[in-house]
C-alpha cells in the first residue's frame, strides 16, 4: 500500500509537474531554441527541440542566399518556436524567423556602433534591390548601389559584400542599407593615401577613364584627376575626343592638388613649350599672315595662326561694307584666310586680327576711279527724309541730299519722283574716306543756272513767266534762263489793291526787278513792286516833280508818250 502510494504521484506532485511543463512551454514559445535534426524526409527536416513533440522545417530555409551547406541527421540548429503544439500535435518551428531574430539583434548592435554588415543582393524591386543580411531582408535604393550609376547589377547579385545600415525600424521591420557609403569611405581612404604621395608639378602617367564635354578623367592608379579641355593642348580643342579616347595612356602634369576635397587638376599642354613666348616679335602689328578659321561666334571669328596660337577677327574688322552681318556669312570654319595683325597682348594672350585690312579700302578705290566732279550711276537702295542712297561700284553707297536733287524745286517734292530700284545718274561732289561717306548731286548734271544766268545781276529788269499761281504769291521763271523765283504777294504791285495773285494767269508774262541775286547761295528774288517804284522815281526825275502841280499820272503819261515816240523814230 505504501509502495503503491509512493510510486503513484500525488495530486500535488502532478500539479507541480504540469506547472513545470506549462512553464517550459511558456518560456519556449516565441523564442529561439536549439534543436537536433532527427530525420530528413524529402524536403522537410524533422527537429527535436526537447519538447514532447517534434517539429518540421523546410530544408530550403537552411539554404539560400550564399548558404549552401547540406543538412544531415544529428546537426544542432537554432529555430524559432512559434507554438509548442499545433492541431497535428507537432511543434511549429521556423528557421527563417530564428535567423531573422538573431540577425536583428546583431544588426541593431552594428547600427548603433556604426559598423558595416555583410549581405547578399538577391532580388530587384521597384526603386532598388533587396538584400539578405543573414536572415533579415533590407532595402538597397538604386542610388546607393555605387558611386556612379550602374547599368548592370547582375555581377553584384548573389555575392556577399559589406553594406552600411542607413535606417532601421524594428516595429515595421524596415531596414535601409547602402553599398555606396562603403565604397566612398574606402575610396576616400585610398584617395587620401594616394594624394599624400603626389605633389604639384609632378609628371605622372595615367589612363583616360572617362570623357566629358569639359574634359577627361584620368586614373592615376586608384585616384582620378581632371584634365580640363583647355589644358589638353595649347591650341583650341572643341571636344576632348579630338585628341583623347577612353583607355588611352597619357602623360600628365599635376597642376593643383586640393587636399581637403582630394581633387586633382591635370595638364598635358604644360609638358610642351609655351607658344606665346616671344609672340610680339613673331607676329608684329601691321603684318599679314595666313591662318585657318577654327571657330565662328556672333562677335567674330577665331583664326589659328599656328598650333596653340589663335587670334580674333572682330565682326567690325571683317568687311569694309558689310555691316551688321553675322561673321558666318563672310567666312566659314576651316577656311584659309589672309589676315593682318592689329594688336598683340602677350599678358592676356590675345591677338586682334583684321580681315578687311588685307583688302583695299573701297572708298579709296572709289575716289581713285571717280574723282570729285565725275559722273556715276547707281541704283536707289533707300529713300530717307534727308535724301536718296545709291548703290555704287565697289559695294559702297553714296547719298544725294534733298538740296542736291533740283535747282528750282524743293527736294521734298522732287524725291517723290524716285523709287527703290531706279537707276540714277549723279555727280560726285565729295568723298570722305575716313568717315566712309560719298556725297552726290543730281541737279549738278544739268549745269548751274546761276552760272549760266548771263548778264543778270541785282537791280536788273527781267521778263518773268508765271509757272504757278499760289495764295501767297507767284512762282515764275525768268525768261532766257533756267532760274525760277517766287514773288510774294506784297511784291506783286505798288498799290495794295493790286497785290492779288489771282490777277495773273499761268503763262502770263511781265517785267520785274531783280532784288537779290546771290550766285554762291543760289538765291534770286524778283519784285514787280520794286520795278514800279524804280520807274516812278525815274519818271519824276526826268519829267517833273510832283510838287509842280502835275499829277503822277500826268508825269507817267508824258513819260510813256515820250518813250513810244522815241521807239517809233
Image (spheres, grey):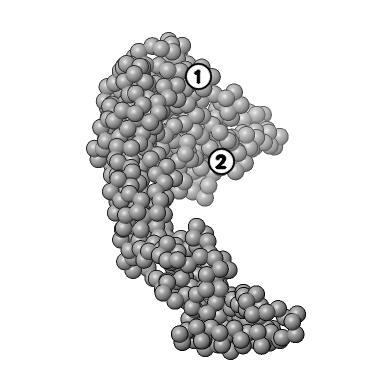
Q: Nearer the viewer, residue 520 or 460?
A: 460
Is disc 1 surrounded by few (<14), some (14 to 19) or many (20+) residues within 10 Å?
Answer: few
Quadrant assignment, res 308 = top left
Mark 2 in CB contact with mark 1 (< 8 angstroms): no
From what the image shows, is residue 126 above or below residue 357?
below
The mark total stands at 2
Nearer-the-camera pick, 9 or 377: 377
Q: Secondary structure at mark 2?
A: strand
Which residue is label 1 attached to? Answer: 258
* Residue pictured at 31% horizontal, 58% vertical: 376
Side of 488 relative to 433 (left or right): right
Checking the image for residue 547, the label placed there is: none
284 over 172 or under it: above or below: above
- Residue at x 55%, y 80% (from the top left corner): 474
Q: Rate crowding at label 2 as few (under 14), some (14 to 19) or many (20 or more) other CA atoms within 10 Å.
A: few
| SS type, badge 1 | strand
Image quadrant where residue 115 sits: top right
Note whether 291 is above or below 470 in the view shown: above
Find the residue positioned furthest to the left. 336
Q: Position of residue 38 (x, y in %)?
A: 40, 32
Classify residue 289 as left or right of residue 557: left
Residue 126 image point, x, y percent: 45, 48
Image coordinates of residue 271 in percent, x first then y, are 33, 16
The foreground one among 172 and 521 is: 521
> Would residue 457 appear left or right of 440 to someone viewing this image?
right
Earlier residue among tags 2 and 1: 2
Instruction: Name the residue that disc number 2 marks.
Output: 174
Q: Residue 392, how many percent across, how many down? A: 32, 56
The reply to whether residue 73 is visible in this rendering is no
The CA span between labels 2 and 1 is: 40 Å
Say which residue appears at 57% left-offset and 82% top-offset.
Answer: 470
Amino acid at each position: 500500500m505504501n509502495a503503491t502510494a509512493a510510486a503513484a504521484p500525488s495530486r500535488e506532485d502532478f500539479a507541480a509537474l504540469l506547472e513545470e511543463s506549462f512553464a517550459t512551454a511558456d518560456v519556449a514559445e516565441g523564442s529561439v531554441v536549439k534543436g537536433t535534426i532527427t530525420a530528413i524526409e524529402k524536403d522537410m527536416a524533422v527537429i527535436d527541440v526537447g519538447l514532447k513533440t517534434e517539429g518540421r522545417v523546410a530544408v530550403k530555409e537552411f539554404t539560400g542566399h550564399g548558404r549552401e551547406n547540406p543538412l544531415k541527421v544529428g546537426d544542432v540548429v537554432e529555430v524559432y518556436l512559434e507554438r509548442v503544439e499545433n492541431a497535428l500535435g507537432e511543434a511549429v518551428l521556423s528557421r527563417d524567423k530564428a535567423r531573422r531574430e538573431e540577425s536583428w539583434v546583431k544588426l541593431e548592435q552594428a547600427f548603433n556602433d556604426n559598423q558595416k554588415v555583410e549581405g547578399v543582393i538577391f532580388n530587384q524591386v521597384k526603386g532598388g534591390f533587396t538584400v539578405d543580411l543573414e536572415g533579415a531582408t533590407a532595402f538597397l535604393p538604386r542610388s546607393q548601389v555605387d558611386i556612379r550609376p550602374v547599368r548592370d547589377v547582375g555581377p553584384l547579385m548573389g555575392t556577399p559584400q559589406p553594406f552600411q545600415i542607413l535606417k532601421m525600424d524594428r516595429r515595421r521591420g524596415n531596414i535601409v542599407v547602402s553599398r555606396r557609403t562603403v565604397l566612398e569611405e574606402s575610396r576616400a581612404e585610398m584617395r587620401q593615401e594616394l594624394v599624400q604621395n603626389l605633389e604639384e608639378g609632378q609628371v605622372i602617367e595615367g589612363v583616360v577613364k572617362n570623357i566629358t564635354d569639359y574634359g577627361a578623367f584620368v586614373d592615376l592608379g586608384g585616384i582620378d584627376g581632371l584634365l580640363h579641355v583647355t589644358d589638353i593642348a595649347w591650341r583650341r580643342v572643341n571636344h576632348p575626343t579630338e585628341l583623347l579616347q577612353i583607355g588611352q595612356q597619357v602623360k600628365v602634369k599635376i597642376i593643383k592638388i586640393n587636399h581637403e576635397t582630394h581633387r586633382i587638376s591635370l595638364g598635358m599642354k604644360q609638358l610642351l613649350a609655351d607658344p606665346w613666348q616671344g609672340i610680339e616679335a613673331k607676329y608684329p602689328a601691321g603684318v599679314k599672315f595666313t591662318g585657318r578659321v577654327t571657330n565662328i561666334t556672333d562677335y567674330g571669328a577665331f583664326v589659328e595662326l599656328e598650333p596653340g596660337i589663335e587670334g580674333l577677327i572682330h565682326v567690325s574688322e571683317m568687311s569694309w561694307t558689310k555691316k551688321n552681318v553675322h561673321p558666318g556669312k563672310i567666312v566659314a570654319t576651316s577656311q584659309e584666310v589672309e589676315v593682318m595683325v592689329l594688336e598683340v597682348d602677350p599678358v592676356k594672350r590675345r591677338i586682334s586680327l583684321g580681315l578687311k585690312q588685307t583688302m583695299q579700302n573701297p572708298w579709296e578705290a572709289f575716289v581713285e576711279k571717280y574723282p570729285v566732279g565725275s559722273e556715276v550711276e547707281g541704283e536707289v537702295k533707300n529713300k530717307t527724309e534727308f535724301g536718296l542712297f545709291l548703290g555704287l561700284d565697289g559695294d559702297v553707297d553714296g547719298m544725294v541730299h534733298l538740296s542736291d536733287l533740283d535747282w528750282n524745286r524743293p527736294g521734298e517734292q522732287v524725291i517723290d519722283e524716285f523709287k527703290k530700284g531706279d537707276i540714277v545718274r549723279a555727280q560726285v561732289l565729295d568723298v570722305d574716306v575716313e568717315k566712309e561717306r560719298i556725297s552726290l548731286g543730281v541737279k549738278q548734271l544739268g549745269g548751274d543756272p546761276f552760272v549760266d544766268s548771263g548778264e543778270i545781276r541785282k537791280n536788273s529788269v527781267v521778263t518773268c513767266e508765271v509757272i504757278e499761281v499760289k495764295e501767297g504769291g507767284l512762282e515764275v521763271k525768268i525768261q532766257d534762263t533756267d532760274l525760277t523765283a517766287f514773288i510774294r504777294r506784297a511784291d506783286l504791285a505798288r498799290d495794295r489793291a493790286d497785290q492779288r495773285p489771282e490777277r495773273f494767269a499761268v503763262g502770263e508774262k511781265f517785267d520785274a526787278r531783280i532784288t537779290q541775286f546771290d550766285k554762291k547761295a543760289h538765291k534770286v528774288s524778283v519784285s514787280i513792286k520794286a520795278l514800279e517804284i524804280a520807274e516812278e522815281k525815274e519818271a519824276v526825275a526826268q519829267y517833273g516833280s510832283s510838287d509842280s502841280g502835275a499829277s503822277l499820272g500826268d508825269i507817267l503819261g508824258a513819260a510813256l508818250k515820250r518813250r513810244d515816240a522815241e521807239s517809233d523814230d
